[in-house]
Image: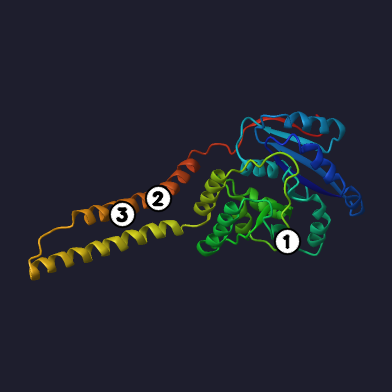
């Protein structure tokens, strides 16, 4: 018998815990046909509602359900990594508890693994239900990453991904503190099959991803898998040095030939402000990379466990 480990990160998802379980176990006849057992790891990311109690109710009814609860909110990336560490399955899959990652796709995904693929990933072809401004910036982010990073990051990619054990071990071999899973999935390689599906709006509750959180997350992705911003900062420094040198020569020549007095302090103030702004912007880019390095060298744990319930214990 093969074992399938389902990793389900949760943060304030008490309304969706039972619904997700019911949708997932609908695949049980297919699993039995393929001689596949399963386990579900709910990773509670420091929820403040009744998420943990809902999961414990499921554990009392089904020993295949497990709980790992963090001491506080460490973020979805930490939850994904924790789930990978706890999973024992020959196959491992990530799914969101809000049912935006439909468990009904699992039979098709497992079929592709049987065909020889190492992993099966999903991407949305529509962004129905999302605010237009968020959809616009999301598309711009993926276009930017394609241009500045050597790592393949598919537009509309979800964390909903089914993998064989060698892929899981490859990801676990990257215990970096600043994690960007979409980039890590692409970096480790392996033969991946992409499945497209239309966006599914969450049935209950509200999204935990605000525009600002998504913006910070995108910065993490850019700095984690591309050094292009550093090259951009260096390029801007060289460009403004050349421009300043050219302006100095122009001023000297104009004074020597025409005796033009020095004037135009308002324009000078504008130029100084522009250059200062560019310098601060470039310094901010360098600061982002320095901050990532600072967090890595401290070697803090990616997450801390408050409670773990496995195999009905």
Q: Is residue 291 left or right of residue 254?
A: right
Cβ–Cβ under 8 Å for marks 2 and 3: no
Instruction: Say which of marks 2 and 3 sits in front.
Output: 3
Viewer-nearest residue: 144 or 202: 202
Residue denoted by label 3: 274
Q: Position of residue 110 (x, y in %)?
A: 81, 57
Q: Which element carries disc 2, helix, strand or loop?
A: helix
| Rendering quarter of residue 153 | bottom right
Q: Which image quarter is the C terminus in?
A: top right
Please tell me how many numbered marks the rendered image carries.
Answer: 3
**Residue at horizontal 86%, vertical 45%?**
25
Q: Is residue 312 visible?
A: no
Q: Give the alpha-carbon distance from disc 2 to disc 3, as whole Å.
A: 19 Å
**Residue at horizontal 74%, vertical 34%?**
14
Q: Is residue 71 left or right of residue 51?
A: left
Q: Give the alpha-carbon distance from disc 1 to disc 2, as whole Å.
A: 37 Å
197 versus 297 height, above or below: below
| Rendering quarter of residue 52 | top right
Q: Position of residue 206 (x, y in %)?
A: 68, 40
- The crowd level at tag 2 (other Cα within 10 Å; few <14, some 14-19, many 20+) is some
Looking at marks 3 and 1 on the same chain, the residue that comes earlier in the sequence is marked by 1
204 versus 148 height, above or below: above
**Residue at horizontal 26%, vertical 64%?**
243
Q: Give the alpha-carbon distance from disc 3 to disc 1, as whole Å.
A: 45 Å
Q: Position of residue 74 (x, y in %)?
A: 60, 37
Cβ–Cβ under 8 Å for marks 3 and 1: no
Looking at marks 1 and 2 on the same chain, the residue that comes earlier in the sequence is marked by 1
Residue denoted by label 1: 196
Q: Is residue 188 visible?
A: yes
Residue denoted by label 2: 286
């Amino acid at each position: 018998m093969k074992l399938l480990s389902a990793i389900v990160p949760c943060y304030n998802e008490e309304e969706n815990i039972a619904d997700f379980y019911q949708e997932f176990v609908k695949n049980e006849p297919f699993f039995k046909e393929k001689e596949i057992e399963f386990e579900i790891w709910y990773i509670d990311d420091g929820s403040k509602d009744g998420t943990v109690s809902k999961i414990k109710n499921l554990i009392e009814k089904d020993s295949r359900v497990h709980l790992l609860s963090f001491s506080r909110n460490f973020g979805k990336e930490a939850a994904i990594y924790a789930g990978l560490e706890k999973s024992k399955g020959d196959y491992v899959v990530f799914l969101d508890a809000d049912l935006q990652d439909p468990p009904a796709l699992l039979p098709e995904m497992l079929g592709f693994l049987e065909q020889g693929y190492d992993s099966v990933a999903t991407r949305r072809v529509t962004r129905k239900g999302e605010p237009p401004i968020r959809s616009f910036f999301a598309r711009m982010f993926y276009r930017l990453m394609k241009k500045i990073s050597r790592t393949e990051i598919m537009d509309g990619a979800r964390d909903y991904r089914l993998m064989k054990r060698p892929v899981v071990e490859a990801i676990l071999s990257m215990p970096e503190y600043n994690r960007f899973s979409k980039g890590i999935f692409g970096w480790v390689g392996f033969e991946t099959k992409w499945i497209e599906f239309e966006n599914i709006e969450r049935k209950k509750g509200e999204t935990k991803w605000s525009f600002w959180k998504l913006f910070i997350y995108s910065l993490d992705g850019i700095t984690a898998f591309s050094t292009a911003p550093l090259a951009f900062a260096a390029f801007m420094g060289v460009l403004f040095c050349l421009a300043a040198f050219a302006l100095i020569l122009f001023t000297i020549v104009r004074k020597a030939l025409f005796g033009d007095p020095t004037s135009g302090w308002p324009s000078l103030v504008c130029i100084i402000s522009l250059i200062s702004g560019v310098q601060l912007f470039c310094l901010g880019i360098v600061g982002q990379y320095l901050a990532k390095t600072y967090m890595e060298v401290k070697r803090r744990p990616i997450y801390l466990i408050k409670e773990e319930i496995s195999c009905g214990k």
